[in-house]
Image (cartoon, rainbow, N blue to C red):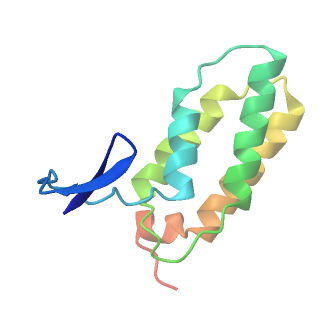
Amino acid sequence: MAAVRVGGSLQCSQLREAPRESPPEPRSGFHRLSARLRALRLEDSSSARTEIHLLFDQLISENYREGGGVAAEDVSALLVQACRLVPPNQNHLVSKVSKLIHHLLNRLQVIHITLGFRS
């Protein structure tokens, strides 16, 4: 039953609501940030460098849970894109992408998954 306002008064009418789709599951921070990084294109501008820097910082500070749904292939694809976006002459970004590589590979244990090493 739905209430409908007609001329300042409320009247009840039998309205059939369309079936609601369940809300989409919220994407993890990794997937959201990864999508933003994939959308960037290599350009040598101050704003592009700032955007890359901020995305790297967000990826590094993301709270990753073990088994949090981040596939090794997704991490690898993100790191390849990150490396493509960083010009070698931008020392600060090179340092930041190195930190990102170290952080993601260790935190998400991608090396163990990808290469099959046992602890």
Q: Position of residue 11 (x, y in %)?
A: 25, 54
Q: Position of residue 36 (x, y in %)?
A: 56, 36
Of 58 and 18, nearer the camera is 18
Q: Is residue 115 above or below residue 35?
A: below
Q: Is residue 42 above or below residue 75?
A: above
Q: Quadrant of the N terminus?
A: bottom left
The residue located at (72%, 45%) in the rendering is 56
The residue located at (70%, 58%) in the rendering is 102
Res 27 quadrant in image: bottom left
Q: Is residue 24 above or below residue 38?
A: below
Of all residues, the one furthest to the bottom in this rendering is 119
From the viewer's perspective, is 58 left or right of 77? right
Q: Is residue 112 above or below residue 19?
A: below
Of 81 and 24, nearer the camera is 24
The residue located at (37%, 60%) in the rendering is 25
The residue located at (52%, 86%) in the rendering is 119
From the viewer's perspective, is 109 left or right of 73? right
Res 84 quadrant in image: top right
Q: Position of residue 90 (x, y in %)?
A: 85, 27
